């Protein structure tokens, strides 16, 4: 239905800044409007990658692009002049956290200019979904994974406090943060999502129509 493409065309027409976060290589279909916005510092794209393990990725995210295709998307976007990076999320402690350095390195080789990450949160029914997934697919790791999640969430499965929202708290969360910063430093990647500019925004022309008619 081209819903995303049509939205980006409107944003491009008015040079309205946009950031895109996706798991899908199909974002490369929208190179033209994204590149036009990037030329005025008004576009950035993040590819979300949980793991580089293709088999694990299919189990966790069966209905979207493989990790290798997402890395390819970073290359295509970067080659078109569009700032692109990797969003390592959700990091699942005890299951995928050890891959942070490898994901950062692979993204840098693909042309990424930034990397960010977020640790998994388990609000409401999400906790039961993950628990069931672990029982079905990795019963031997269930206790370790759930224990590590509680370790970064103040002893709970979900900590909604602002300071813990993305990165968690505690010793293990600090270890993850140190691992991530070191990996980014080695790869030469920024650890912040790029800021966008509204300096080139174009206002619609003509008189504004009345919402209520005459």
Image (cartoon, helix red, strand yellow):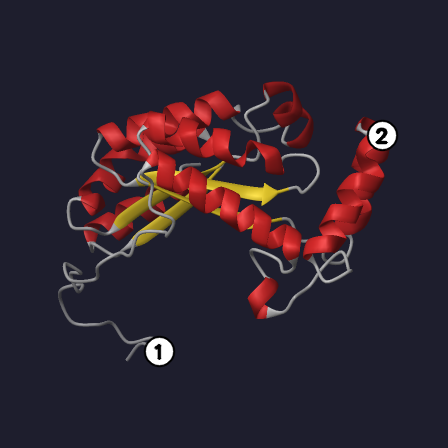
Q: Residue at x 53, y 36 (%)?
A: 100
Compared with 87, 64 (above or below) is above
Give the quarter of the image for residue 34: top left
Residue 85, how many percent across, how many down? 37, 39
**174 lies left or right of 25:** right
**Of circles 2 and 1, which is in front?**
2
Query: How many residues crowd mark 1 within 10 Å: few (<14), some (14–19), many (20+)?
Result: few
**First of labels 2, 1 by sequence position:** 2
Looking at the image, do the residues carrying marks 2 and 1 touch, with CB atoms under 8 Å apart?
no
Q: Which residue is mark 1?
A: 212
Q: From the image, which quarter does the N terminus lie in?
A: top left
Mark 2 lies on a secondary structure that is helix
Q: Residue at x 30, y 39 (%)?
A: 113
Q: How far apart are labels 2 and 1 at the CA level?
A: 63 Å
**198 lies left or right of 52:** left
Compared with 209, 63 (above or below) is above
**144 lies left or right of 51:** right
Q: From the image, which quarter does the C terminus lie in?
A: bottom left
Residue 26, how many percent across, how many down? 42, 29
- The circle on residue 127 is none
Q: Residue at x 44, y 46 (%)?
A: 181
Residue 198, how many percent across, how many down? 21, 62
Give the quarter of the image for residue 144: top right
**70 lies left or right of 89:** left
Instruction: Determine if residue 46 is in view.
Output: no
Residue in front for this viewpoint, 12 or 183: 183
Mark 1 lies on a secondary structure that is loop
Instruction: Determine if residue 18 is in view.
Output: yes
- The circle on residue 140 is 2
Q: Residue at x 57, y 55 (%)?
A: 167
């Amino acid at each position: 239905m081209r819903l995303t493409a049509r939205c980006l065309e409107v944003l491009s027409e008015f040079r309205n800044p946009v950031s895109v976060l996706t798991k899908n290589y199909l974002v490369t279909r929208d190179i033209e409007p994204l590149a036009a916005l990037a030329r005025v510092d008004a576009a950035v794209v993040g590819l979300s990658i949980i793991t580089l393990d293709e088999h694990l990725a299919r189990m966790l995210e069966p209905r979207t692009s493989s990790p290798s295709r997402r890395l390819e998307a970073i290359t295509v976007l970067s080659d078109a002049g569009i700032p692109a990076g990797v969003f390592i999320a959700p990091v699942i402690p005890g299951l995928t956290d050890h891959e942070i350095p490898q994901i950062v390195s692979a993204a840098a080789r693909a042309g990424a200019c930034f990397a960010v990450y977020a640790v998994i949160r388990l609000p409401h029914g999400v906790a039961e979904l993950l628990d069931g997934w672990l029982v079905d697919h990795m019963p031997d790791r269930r206790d370790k994974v759930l224990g590590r999640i509680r370790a970064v969430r103040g002893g709970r499965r979900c900590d909604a406090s602002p300071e813990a929202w993305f990165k968690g708290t505690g010793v293990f969360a600090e270890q993850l943060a140190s691992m991530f910063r070191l990996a980014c430093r080695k790869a030469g990647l920024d650890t912040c999502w790029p800021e966008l500019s509204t300096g080139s925004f174009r206002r619609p022309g003509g008189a504004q129509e009345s919402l209520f008619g005459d």
